[in-house]
Image (tube, rainbow, N blue to C red):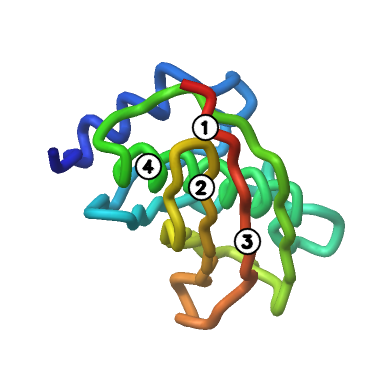
Amino acid sequence: MTMTNAEADKILSANFAPWVLDLGLSVEAVEGHRAVLRMPWSDRLAREGGALSGQALMAAADTATVIAVSAARGSYGPMTTVQQSTSFQRAVIGSDVLIEAVVTKLGRRMAFADIVMTDEGSGEIAARASTVYALLG
């Protein structure tokens, strides 16, 4: 079963804490084992010096993983982060970020994903992450 962008957006609105929703994430694309989310630029998410905070990027990567895993499974189910590793490559200032999460392995109880976060303005990679999720239901 293929998940639509609208179904993926509903997963966002129904399953995440209010502070995650404050990131303003929206689903740009969802297909197979892949999801692309957009995080719009917000001064509220910037740290001293005007760059987007790493915490916002990490939360966006974590959230995109949930959408990608849900797409790969055909629907949302309970899951939790077991591990996340993030490497920051460049600052994002004044630009939206595109977060692409790709499930690299989907098992019965575990899922693995790679995430690339791109500064939409420059097209440059801002950060990369890898995640491991436990599938609870």
Q: Are marks 1 and 2 in contact (CB under 8 Å)?
A: yes
Q: Which mark is first along the chain, 3 or 1?
A: 3
Upstream in the sequence, badge 4 or badge 3?
4
Amino acid type shown at disc 1: Leu
In this view, 90 is above or below 106: below
Looking at marks 1 and 4 on the same chain, the residue that comes earlier in the sequence is marked by 4
Q: Which residue is mark 1?
A: 135
Residue on which disc 3 sits? 130
- The answer for how far apart the CA atoms under marks 1 and 3 are is 16 Å
Task: State how far apart marks 4 and 3 are (Cα).
Answer: 20 Å
Give the farthest residue toward the right: 48
Mark 4 residue type: Ser
Residue 34 spot, x, y in % from top left: 33, 57
If you read the primary sequence from the N terminus, does the residue marked by circle 2 or circle 4 appear first?
4
Which residue does the image show at 23% across and 30% down from the upper left?
7
- Mark 1 lies on a secondary structure that is strand
Q: Which mark is residue 111?
A: 2
Horizontal side, residue 34 vs residue 39: left or right: left
- Of pointers 1 and 2, the one earlier in the residue sequence: 2
